[in-house]
Image (cartoon, rainbow, N blue to C red):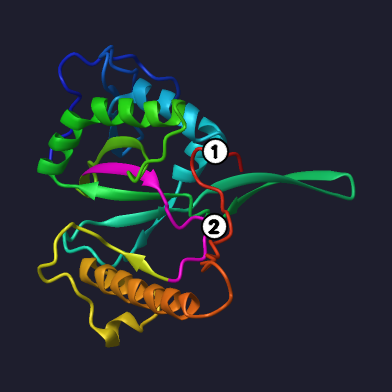
């Protein structure tokens, strides 16, 4: 696989022996950067770079440095529930801290699973659809944040094309990646659903549903809501025939956790 910067990208020489770099493209929509070391060339396209940066400034108050550190490393994540066959990763953040001992200061790099973001690899068709949709999507999320409106859409905070080619080993890779919030960040979730809006082949068996970290499907949600309605009617019927006064249903919501759009 060859590696080249698309037409229209600017090219600036980098500093330092054995390395070259090109600056960002003047494109108003995407930022394109190419750099290299002695053996490998790298290319990165940041889709809608400025628009996503502005969106992150609104919904991710920890800032760009935290975002970059989260993306510094990631590990594969075997997400269950979907059938697209897409590759997923979770961010493995890199954080630097200083330790002072007997008048000596040393800097250490601490690597931990910060669990903040999920990366999804997209197919050629998916990335094209996303590129077409992204401006409206970013505007929608920005409006929801500005007007304090709830939304059921997962918050996508960036999209990238990452390419590399090693001239010595011929190892090469090209990936289009979405970076989105991890909905389960700092949350204890007992049941997870992957919903497609269909009831065809969308049921996890009772045996599978009992397994830990099982992702349930559309029909499981419908069945659970049906059971909830039945139990509510039974409760109301019981209370209506008693002298306890008006029926009262109490709900115990889960503990609040940090999510994108709130301070950490």
Number of residues whose C-alpha sits closer than 10 Å to that of mark 2, classed few (under 14), some (14–19) or many (20 or more): some
Looking at the rendered structure, which numbered label has been put on residue 186? Answer: 2
Q: Magenta residues, as a range? A: 175-190
Q: Quadrant of the N terminus?
A: top left
Of tags 1 and 2, the one toward the viewer is: 2
> 196 or 63: which is nearer to us?
196
Relative side of 104 to 78, left or right: right
Disc nearer the start of the sequence (1/2): 1
Q: Which residue is drawn at the image coordinates 30% and 36% (left, top)?
A: 159
Q: Is residue 44 above or below residue 9?
A: below
The residue singled out by tag 1 in the image is 66
What percent of the width, then of the height, locates residue 15? 44, 20
Q: Which residue is drawn at the image coordinates 17% and 22% (left, top)?
A: 6
Q: Is residue 189 above or below residue 181?
A: below
Q: Quadrant of the C terminus?
A: top right
Residues at circles 1 and 2 in contact by the CB criterion of under 8 Å: no
> 227 or 135: which is nearer to us?
227
Work out whether residue 134 can be spotted.
yes
Number of residues whose C-alpha sits closer than 10 Å to that of mark 1, classed few (under 14), some (14–19) or many (20 or more): some
Q: Which residue is drawn at the image coordinates 41% and 77% (left, top)?
A: 237
State the SS at label 2.
Answer: loop
Is 178 magenta? The answer is: yes
Give the quadrant of residue 157: top left
Relative side of 38 to 223, left or right: right
> 37 or 28: which is nearer to us?
28
């Amino acid at each position: 696989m060859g590696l080249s910067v698309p037409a229209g990208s600017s090219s600036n020489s980098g500093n330092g022996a054995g390395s070259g770099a090109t600056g960002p493209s003047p494109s108003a929509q995407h930022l394109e950067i190419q750099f290299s070391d002695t053996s490998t060339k790298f290319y990165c396209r940041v889709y809608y770079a400025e628009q996503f940066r502005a969106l992150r400034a609104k919904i991710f108050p920890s800032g760009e440095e935290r975002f970059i550190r989260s993306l510094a490393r990631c590990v594969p994540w075997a997400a269950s529930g979907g059938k697209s066959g897409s590759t997923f990763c979770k961010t493995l953040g890199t954080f630097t801290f200083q330790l002072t001992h007997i008048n000596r200061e040393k800097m250490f790099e601490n690597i931990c699973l910060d669990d903040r973001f999920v990366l999804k690899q997209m197919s050629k068709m998916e990335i094209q659809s996303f590129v077409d949709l992204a401006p409206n999507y970013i505007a929608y999320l920005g409006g929801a944040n500005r007007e304090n409106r709830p939304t059921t859409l997962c918050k996508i905070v960036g999209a990238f094309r990452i390419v590399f080619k090693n001239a010595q080993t011929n190892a090469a890779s090209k990936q289009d990646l979405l970076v989105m919030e991890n909905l389960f960040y700092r949350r204890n979730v007992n049941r997870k659903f992957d919903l497609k809006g269909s009831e065809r082949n969308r049921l996890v068996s009772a045996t599978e549903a009992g397994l830990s970290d099982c992702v349930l499907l559309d029909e499981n949600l419908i069945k659970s809501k049906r059971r909830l309605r039945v139990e509510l009617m039974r409760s109301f019927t019981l209370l209506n025939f008693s002298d306890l006064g008006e029926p009262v249903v109490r709900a115990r919501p889960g503990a609040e956790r940090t999510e994108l759009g709130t301070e950490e």
